[in-house]
Amino acid sequence: MELGEGPVYDPDLDCLWWFDILGCGLRRFDLASGTVAAQALPFMGSVIARIDGRRHLLASDQGLFLRDLASGELTPHCELEPSSRGNRSNDGRVHPSGALWIGTMGKDAATGAGAIYHVAGKVVTRIFDKVSIPNSICFSPNGEIGYFVDSRVNILMRVPVSPTTGLPTGQAEPFIDGRDRPGVFDGSVCDANGDIWNARWGGGGVDRYDPAGRHLARYDMPAERVTCPAFFGPRADRLMITSCWEGLDAAGRTADPLAGATFELGVAVEGRIEPAFQL
């Protein structure tokens, strides 16, 4: 797919969900049967969060929507950026409190056009502005630390967060400088030990950092433009990674034939099931 993003494991259905943002599509992989299904969407979706066994929350370029699992029907939930119709949603994740952090960006990736929002029920609060390409949104297991990056800046940020509300309680500070290595920080996920697993877009790998920011390991991937990881399985002990071919010409796609594929990293992980969004 052109821009695979936003993977998440659904323990209620034992399946993986992820998006083709530019193709306006949602994919589902059932672990038991090994089958993949696709649903066309009327918008550019990028993040899916489970609510319960019947509903999901979807983030898109047209706002936030509730999705009925049985029918696939979409119902508007709330606006995200009503004054920024040139933007779309990008990376996001649910905090342990049940609030959603969701980033936006210009559809043309204009510098500083996006922001990161905190969504609690239908209350939307802008928490970081002037973001170009929001990514790597994830949280420590105790919910006291939030991480995010502007991929154009390529410095992972760290911010103290209230474990009960998911709102920042202090200033964001630089945590890991990614400017001296190939590629940029894209999506990240934080495991049960607080280690950060990051997809290195343009760097062809997944990097692992400990809670102090020390680089622990690099796992090479068979595609250069990997986009986002997600823990999956009933024990959250497996890791999937999406990728993309967005921006590649014919020669680039020939040189990177697996760009756009979805992969499983062949190492055991101590992951976590993503929290549910609280309405």
Image (cartoon, rainbow, N blue to C red):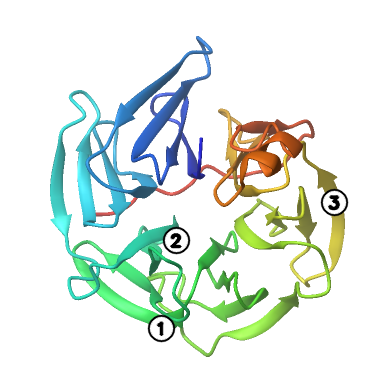
Query: Dot 1: few (<14), some (14–19), or many (≥20) neighbours within 10 Å?
Result: some
Can you tell which mark lies on residue 76?
none
Question: Residue 19 location in percent, x, y?
Answer: 43, 40
Amino acid type of the residue tagged 2 in the rendering: His
Kindly identify the residue that appears in the image at 16 percent across and 54 percent down: 77
Structural distance between the alpha carbons of marks 2 and 3: 26 Å
Identify the element where label 1 is drawn.
strand
Q: Nearer the viewer, mark 1 or mark 2?
A: 1
Identify the element where label 2 is drawn.
loop
Q: Nearer the viewer, residue 103 or 124?
A: 103
Q: Which residue is mark 2?
A: 95
Q: Is residue 114 left or right of residue 208?
A: left
Kindly identify the residue that appears in the image at 41 percent across and 46 percent down: 21
Q: Quadrant of residue 80?
A: bottom left
Amino acid type of the residue tagged 1 in the rendering: Asp
Q: Earlier in the sequence, mark 3 or mark 1?
A: 1
Q: Nearer the viewer, residue 145 or 152?
A: 152
Q: Which residue is mark 1?
A: 129
Question: Residue 26 location in percent, x, y?
Answer: 37, 34
Question: Is residue 98 depicted above or below 222 in this figure?
Answer: below
Q: Earlier in the sequence, mark 2 or mark 3?
A: 2
Is residue 139 visible from the viewing direction of this image? yes
Q: Which residue is mark 3?
A: 218
Query: Dot 3: few (<14), some (14–19), or many (≥20) neighbours within 10 Å?
Result: some
Q: Nearer the viewer, residue 72 or 22?
A: 22
Tell me, yes or no, whether the two marked residues, 2 and 3, touch with CB atoms within 8 Å: no
